[in-house]
Image (cartoon, rainbow, N blue to C red):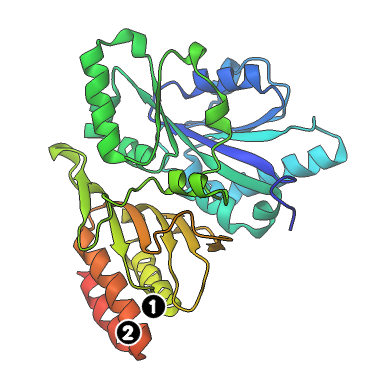
Amino acid sequence: MLTASHRIPVTLLTGFLGSGKTTLLNRILRERPLTAVVMNEFGEVALDHQLVEGVQGPLALLGGGCVCCQVQGDLAPALKNLWMGRAGGQVPRFERLVIETTGLADPAAVLATLVQDRWLARHYDLDGVVTTVDAQLGADSIARHREAQRQAAVADRLVVTKTDLVPQETLDALRETLRRLNPQAPIVAGRTADLDIAPLVSIGGWQPKTDPAAVRAWLAVSRADAAPSRLLSRPVAAHSERIRSFSLRFDEPLHWEGLEAALGMLVDFRGPQLLRMKAIVNVAGRERPVVLHGAQHVFYPPQELPRWPDADRASRFVFITEGIEPALIDRILREFSQAARDGLIERVHNASAKTLMT
């Protein structure tokens, strides 16, 4: 496999209709001109690409509908063709790739293609998800549209646009909504022309660096947030209370067989509701921690870190879910770990399957 330094970093740029994705993309291209762009567009006539200014990298358009319905047919071949064209000199040697989704897309399908396609995983490095949110209409979009909620929930960076068009109290209220929806994602706000682009294209959100401070920042959960026997659960608001952010802590090492089975059950039965998960895990029998990261049915391969980021050896999980109670996930993880220790995986598996199907 190519090393991360040889793979092309990929930014997934998403956000609801009219939230300023293309404006932000233009800003990125002005500062990072050797950027390849893959755009998908809703409808039969492609228009957005006419608004993209001065592209020196290649531009691929995925038209005719939502990319989440087309990724198996269009996205993977498009990315492979871009790479081969770059290697063969038919297209400029672009240094990064931005995939801009339509405003109605659920990013999970794109993430699945990037993570699960073995060829793409060898040649492209998923850097992170950037979601734009309209300062004027963002709160209403989140309240009314499931797509807007899910786009914000999976983000590694939230970019609030059009801030000059709203009073401070409106901006403060939107920030609070976003923090409840996705407390792990930093919020960047301001006029797009004034934004610092570097933090948006160098995230490292899907493969945390091994520096201890970087791991802690990636997990974005403190000891207080994941204290023993405590769940930190934050519903977004009454209108979207099914989406929750919460953290779990396990002081005893978890057995890998049980953990793998528990997460497999959650993905199989509740995958679409498992919007985001990050974890650093103390696996029984291992000295070094294991990092887990996923979104819905998409899970990155487990990564073993060379050392713990701090003196705390507890397993720490951060979840953003839709319609899954924190206590249910907590119970399943604990029961499966205990079952693996006692050799009773099959019995717990059958009982949990009945619970998750209800």
Q: Residue at x 48, y 79 (%)?
A: 285
Identity of the residue furthest to the bottom in this view? 343
Q: Residue at x 60, y 33 (%)?
A: 98
Q: Mark 2 is on which residue type?
A: Ala
- Residue 233's label in the rendered image is none
- The residue lying toward the viewer, choosing from 177 and 93, is 177
Q: In this view, does 306 lie above or below 216?
A: below
24 sits left or right of 267 in the view: right
Quadrant where the N terminus lies? bottom right
Which residue in the structure is indicated by mark 2? 339
Which residue in the structure is indicated by mark 1? 258
Say if mark 2 contacts mark 1, CB within 8 Å. Answer: yes
Query: Which element is circle 1 on?
Result: helix
Mark 2 → mark 1, Cα distance in angstroms: 7 Å
Asked whether residue 58 is in view, the answer is yes
> x%, y% of residue 15?
41, 31
Q: Which residue is drawn at 35% across and 58% down?
A: 317
For label 2, the crowd category at 10 Å Cα-Cα, with few meaning under 14, some 14 to 19 and many 20 or more, is: some
For label 1, the crowd category at 10 Å Cα-Cα, with few meaning under 14, some 14 to 19 and many 20 or more, is: many
Q: Mark 1 is on which residue type?
A: Gly
Q: In which quarter of the image is residue 297?
A: bottom left
Q: Quadrant of residue 31?
A: top right
Q: Residue at x 55, y 23 (%)?
A: 197
> x%, y% of residue 286?
51, 74
329 sits left or right of 128 in the view: left
Q: Pick whichever of labels 2 and 1 is earlier in the sequence.
A: 1
